[in-house]
């Protein structure tokens, strides 16, 4: 049967894309509301970061089983399940009087996004003809990029004019529309199979990710050798070891650990994760910095984030063209150097950043990130044999979400530790915590530059893998 890009197919792509769009939109929109949530629920900075960290962590635990879900269940049922979980989370978020229930709602949103996130690209890959594939994949990327760009502005304006709960009220109307259009347009993508779920492997991965994150985020309020920190980290590492044992000799493993033996793949994956950690950490810091340190409004905090998101989208598009002509090394190196320059200046001026400086430095950093991020994934995957690309893609997607959660947690933890110094004003301790985070991120990006110099292949070697 000849593949065609029909209006119904476009509707199916946009309907599935709406779920990932709303998931990212709500994530970036709520970031600018953190100072408001801290006051309303009487919580600390390290607690409020869980509003987004939890979503990313839940997505990271769902992504590894997405391929098995798509083989076992009908495509339309997967879409409806994603919508139901997401909308249940929205309803809880809209009406909750308590912070812990807000987190429950966000967890349900994470489940919905984790189910729906791969669906849009699966529809594109299965239904779009090859000569239109690049264009439609670009449309899919633009949907998520638009959510990143619009989220902070949307969240700032809605919170300033109404309340933060309207972020979720508006999202629920858009989700209802997507439910009707998706139910009509989404068709089956593959033949269903009675695949056996790898419950043991999935549980080991999920427990490891959750406990490692809990241990890391507990450092702000507990000493290292407490059970909350060292205990969680130790059990998380043991769970990781159990996954290695279960998956090592399984030829149909959820995620094959043997792929990590490919150093070129592994090192570029590390660069990819470090870049995501830095980006989510900065996305957490600057809305708080603008409101707490510079005494700006919540809407101003949203607008200040917009130029950086636009630079990210533009540079990502440019990087794709450069990669096609020159290979991945050039956009990766240029992107890392630009990001390094931005974070270096953030570190130098860390406790005295004006709003204009934040706009310019965030745009410089984010433009560099846009240049290198997708190129690292492309280059990393081409370091693997074609038969391992699906497994490699699952690894990148899982660790992207976990790295994002880790970046948010890193910034929230360091700022919270600094804010424990009650001898200084809150705006001073917030600025100091932000600078500590800039220093850590600077170290990560320096490592990225070193790794990229050694392990990112030159153009003449790219097609030999």
Image: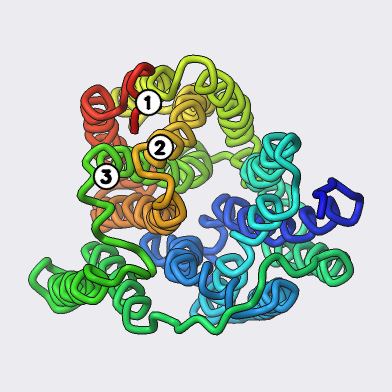
Q: Residue at x 79, y 53 (%)?
A: 14
Q: Residue 457 at what x, y percent from top left? A: 31, 25
- In this view, 419 is above or below 354: below
Marks 2 and 3 sit apart, C-alpha to C-alpha, by 12 Å
Q: Residue 436 at what x, y percent from top left? A: 26, 40
Q: Residues within 10 Å of mark 2 (few under 14, many from 20)?
A: some
Name the one closer to the observer, 420 or 389: 389
At mark 3, the secondary structure is helix
Q: Is residue 196 left or right of residue 411?
A: right
- In this view, 432 is above or below 44: above
Q: Residue 317 at what x, y percent from top left? A: 61, 27
Residue 269 in which image quadrant:
top left
Give the mark, 1 or 3, whose residue is nearer the N terminus. Answer: 3
Nearer to us: label 2 or label 3: 2
Labels 1 & 2 near each other (Cβ < 8 A): yes
Marks 1 and 2 sit apart, C-alpha to C-alpha, by 7 Å
Give the mark, 2 or 3, whose residue is nearer the N terminus. Answer: 3
Which part of the image, by quadrant, shows the N terminus? bottom right
Q: Residue 462: give its label.
A: 1
- Report which residue position mark 3 lands on: 266
Marks 1 and 3 sit apart, C-alpha to C-alpha, by 16 Å
- Report which residue position mark 2 lands on: 382
Labels 1 & 3 near each other (Cβ < 8 A): no
């Amino acid at each position: 049967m000849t593949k065609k890009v029909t209006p119904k197919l476009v509707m199916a792509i946009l309907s599935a894309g709406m779920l990932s769009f709303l998931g990212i939109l709500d994530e970036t929109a709520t970031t600018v509301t953190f100072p408001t949530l801290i006051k309303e629920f009487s919580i600390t900075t390290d607690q409020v970061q869980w509003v987004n960290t939890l979503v990313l962590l839940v997505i990271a635990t769902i992504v590894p089983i997405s391929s098995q879900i798509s083989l076992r269940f009908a495509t339309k049922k997967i879409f409806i399940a994603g919508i139901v979980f997401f909308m249940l989370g929205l309803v809880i978020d809209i009406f909750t009087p308590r912070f812990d229930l807000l987190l429950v709602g966000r967890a349900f949103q994470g489940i919905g996004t984790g189910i729906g996130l791969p669906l849009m690209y699966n529809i594109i890959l299965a239904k779009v003809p090859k000569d239109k594939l690049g264009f439609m994949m670009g449309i899919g990327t633009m949907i998520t990029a638009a959510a990143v760009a619009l989220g902070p502005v949307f969240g700032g304006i809605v919170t300033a004019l109404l309340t933060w709960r309207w972020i979720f009220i508006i999202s629920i109307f858009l989700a209802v529309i997507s439910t009707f259009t998706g139910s009509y347009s989404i068709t089956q993508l593959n033949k269903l199979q009675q695949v056996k779920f790898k419950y043991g492997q999935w549980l080991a991965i999920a427990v490891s990710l959750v406990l490692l994150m809990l241990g890391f985020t507990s450092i702000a309020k507990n000493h290292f050798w407490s059970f909350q920190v060292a205990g969680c980290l130790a059990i998380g590492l043991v769970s990781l070891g159990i996954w290695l044992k279960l998956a090592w000799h399984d030829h149909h493993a959820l995620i094959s650990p043997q792929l990590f033996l490919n150093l070129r793949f592994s090192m570029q994956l590390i660069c990819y994760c470090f870049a995501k950690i830095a980006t989510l950490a900065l996305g957490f810091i600057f809305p708080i910095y603008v409101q707490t340190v510079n005494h700006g409004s919540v809407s101003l905090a949203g607008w200040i984030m917009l130029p950086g998101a636009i630079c990210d989208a533009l540079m990502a598009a440019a990087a794709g063209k450069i990669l096609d002509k020159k290979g991945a090394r050039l956009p990766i190196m240029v992107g890392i150097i630009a990001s390094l320059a931005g974070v270096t200046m953030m570190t130098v001026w860390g406790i005295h950043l004006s709003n204009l400086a934040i706009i310019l430095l965030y745009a410089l950093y984010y433009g560099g990130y846009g240049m290198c991020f997708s190129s690292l994934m492309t280059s990393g995957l081409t370091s693997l044999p074609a038969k391992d690309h699906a497994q490699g893609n699952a690894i990148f997607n899982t660790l992207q979400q976990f790295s994002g959660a880790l970046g948010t947690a890193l910034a929230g933890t360091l700022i919270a530790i600094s804010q424990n110094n009650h001898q200084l004003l809150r705006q001073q301790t917030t600025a100091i915590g932000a600078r500590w985070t800039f220093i850590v991120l600077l170290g990560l990006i320096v490592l990225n530059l070193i790794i990229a110099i050694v392990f990112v292949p030159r153009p003449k070697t790219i097609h030999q893998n």
